Image (cartoon, helix red, strand yellow):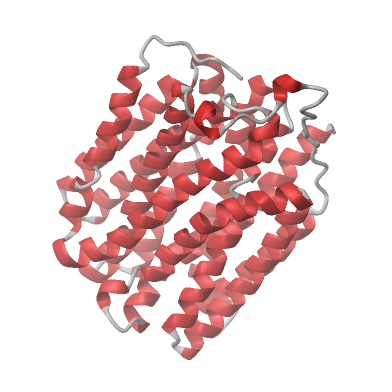
């Protein structure tokens, strides 16, 4: 087995653990919040803080891994995530909303480190295979999509409640992920500016003059932001406002996460064959159809269809944007550019998640859905502007 293949296999396994923990938090965060929060308007705050933790942790995560290496950063994040799961369980048992919020925020910070899995995968293969490597890492999330809701459904077998059991099982998964990550053999990509002046790091303003850098960041930011915004509101809208069962709500979130990651089986190949712009365009089209399905009704069927399409659109826009980003920076710029990109992506996601609960409780589901239109128009305008312009690889 080659080093690249082994690295991809280990990263896929670790990705499954992190996604399981994330899905558990997203599924139960708003519901727990609705039960123990002092106000219904902040019921989604735990999920929002998880995403905010990811946003705030992106640049520190990049700097830590630049100083200590990706491997050390990944292992530390997995162990910290296990501790956050146990802290969340204690907070729920004690009905301490503020402590539960701290636990989900800590979970978000660890997820900031795991978001670098895709860059570690891209750096393990030649540039022309980066899209495929990135999409393969996301395949690990398919296992997490099944495992996370299943741990909630079977949680009472492990502890006194479904949520407590799921959190304890997730802590065990994160410990296993730490073991897998300890076996990584990642390449060093340190450019010597004296020996290779053409590889010296450029000022950010020079990097940003590349319109495809802007498209890459915009695609990831809008793709992730819109997805998180609607996804955060969905469990509360379904279970708390519309009275659908916890089982149905968990199944819809599972369908959404599968919609996010199943396309990874072929999205990398599509990018290799057709390029990043057509795949980003397909993701945008999927989002438009998502809005139509979400506005058609609020039965389980409508939620399921809209959430699956939301996941597919996210995959195409996020994988397409990430692959495009990799071609816009030099090796010496990777940590800084990756950190800035992820800060924009997850900062927007955090803002969307924070707004989701407030808008949902004040104005309802329809307003949440319609309010995403301006962001989609912005990506459309960027794609039209770049139509016919070739991508210049750095």
- Between 118 and 265, the residue placed more toward the observer is 118
- Between 307 and 133, the residue placed more toward the observer is 133
- Between 118 and 268, the residue placed more toward the observer is 118
Residue sitting at 50 percent across and 48 percent down?
343
Q: Quadrant of residue 6?
A: top right
Quadrant of the frame with the C terminus: top right
Residue sitting at 60 percent across and 72 percent down?
84
Quadrant of the frame with the N terminus: top right
Look at the image and tell me whether residue 255 can be seen.
Answer: no
Q: Residue furthest bottom?
A: 94
Q: Is residue 67 left or right of residue 236?
A: right
Residue sitting at 80 percent across and 37 percent down?
188
Residue 145 on image: x %, y %? 51, 53
Residue 167 on image: x %, y %? 57, 73
Looking at the image, residue 377 lies above or below residue 221: above
Looking at the image, residue 366 lies above or below residue 247: above
Question: How many marks do you count on the picture?
Answer: 0
Residue sitting at 49 percent across and 55 percent down?
55
Residue 287 on image: x %, y %? 30, 37
Looking at the image, residue 93 lies above or below residue 81: below
Look at the image and tell me whether residue 151 can be seen.
Answer: yes
């Amino acid at each position: 087995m080659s080093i690249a293949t082994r690295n991809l296999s280990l990263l896929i396994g670790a990705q499954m653990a992190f996604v399981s923990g994330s899905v558990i938090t997203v599924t139960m965060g708003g519901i727990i919040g609705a039960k123990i929060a002092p106000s219904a308007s902040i019921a989604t705050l735990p999920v929002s803080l998880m995403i905010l933790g990811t946003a705030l942790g992106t640049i520190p995560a990049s700097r830590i891994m630049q100083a200590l290496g990706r491997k050390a950063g990944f292992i530390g994040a997995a162990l910290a995530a296990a501790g956050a799961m146990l802290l969340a369980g204690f907070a729920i048992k004690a009905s301490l909303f503020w402590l539960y919020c701290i636990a989900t925020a800590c979970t978000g910070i660890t997820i900031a480190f795991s978001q670098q899995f895709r860059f570690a995968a891209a750096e393990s293969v030649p540039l022309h295979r980066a899209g495929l490597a990135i999409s393969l890492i996301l395949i690990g999330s398919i296992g997490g999509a099944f495992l996370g809701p299943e741990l909630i459904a079977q949680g009472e077998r492990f502890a006194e409640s479904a949520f407590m059991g799921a959190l304890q099982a997730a802590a065990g998964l994160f410990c296993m992920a730490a073991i897998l990550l300890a076996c990584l053999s990642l390449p060093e990509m340190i450019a010597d500016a004296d020996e290779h002046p053409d590889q010296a790091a450029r000022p950010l303003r020079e990097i940003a003059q590349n319109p495809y850098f802007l498209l890459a960041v915009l695609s990831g930011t809008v793709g992730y932001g819109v997805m998180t915004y609607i996804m955060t509101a969905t469990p509360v809208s379904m279970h708390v406002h519309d009275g659908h069962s916890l089982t149905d709500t968990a199944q819809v979130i599972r369908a959404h996460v599968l919609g996010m990651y199943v396309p990874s089986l072929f999205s990398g190949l599509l990018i290799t064959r057709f390029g990043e712009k057509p795949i980003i365009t397909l993701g945008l089209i999927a989002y438009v159809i998502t809005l139509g399905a979400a506005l058609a009704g609020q039965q389980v069927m409508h939620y399921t269809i809209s959430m699956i399409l939301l996941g597919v659109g996210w995959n195409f826009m996020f994988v397409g944007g990430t692959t495009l980003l990799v071609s816009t920076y030099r090796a010496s710029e990777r940590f800084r550019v990756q950190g800035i990109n992820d800060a924009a992506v997850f900062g927007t996601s955090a803002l969307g998640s924070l707004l989701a609960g407030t808008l949902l409780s004040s104005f309802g589901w329809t307003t949440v859905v319609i309010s995403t239109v301006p962001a989609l128009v912005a990506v459309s305008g960027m794609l039209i502007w770049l139509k016919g312009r070739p991508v210049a690889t750095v």
